[in-house]
Amino acid sequence: MSYDRNNVFARILRGELPCHKVHEDEHTLAFMDIMPQTPGHTLVIPRAEARDLFELPAEVLTATIVATQRVAHAVRQAFSPPGVMIAQFNGAAAGQTVFHLHFHVIPRYDGESLTLHGAKPGDSQVLAAHAERIRACLQV
């Protein structure tokens, strides 16, 4: 299957859809998941067109995972969770629903289960505030 240039993340990259940006550089963009599983749930995507991990050139994958680590540090600092889950899915059978490679950075808390992803959108004002908290930690 070929890359769909009209997937939601491609449209965000082109500025056709809004997002609550957390970080961007020449290779990556990080923004709040619009349907967060926990407060602070953030996505990191490469700017390159790639459906999954197997389609991304190694040098861009390296930049993407480094950005994911940087964002995860900021999420941990901003939300103080006892754990941070990094998730990445390849193919529908693995749970991938947007076919542009992306990493989920999800704060995890003892005794709290994840909400079902895609169940309901987060409040835009809350997402904006969460993005600001994470950006502030990236600037330190």
Image (cartoon, rainbow, N blue to C red):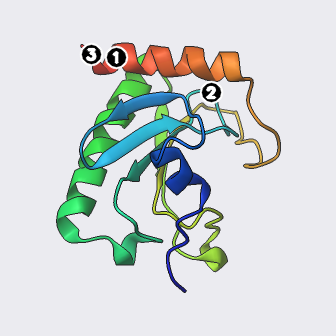
Residue beneath the point at 37% across and 13% down: 136
User: Hey, what amino acid is under mark 2?
Assistant: Pro
Rendered position, 87 above or below 74: below
User: Hey, what amino acid is under mark 1?
Assistant: Cys
- The residue carrying mark 3 is 139
Q: Position of residue 114 (x, y in %)?
A: 70, 42
User: Hey, what amino acid is under mark 3?
Assistant: Gln
Horizontal relation, residue 49 to residue 69: left or right: right
Crowding at dot 2, Cα within 10 Å, few <14 / some 14-19 / many 20+, comes out as: some
Q: Give the alpha-carbon distance from disc 1 to disc 2, as whole Å.
A: 15 Å
Note whether residue 79 is visible: no
User: Residue lying furthest bottom in this view?
Assistant: 1
- The residue carrying mark 2 is 39
- The residue carrying mark 1 is 137
User: Residue lying furthest left in this view?
Assistant: 59
Horizontal relation, residue 126 to residue 61: left or right: right
Q: Give the alpha-carbon distance from disc 2 to disc 3, as whole Å.
A: 20 Å
For residue 4, which quarter of the picture? bottom right
Crowding at dot 1, Cα within 10 Å, few <14 / some 14-19 / many 20+, comes out as: some
Residue beneath the point at 46% across and 30% down: 21
Q: Secondary structure at mark 1?
A: helix
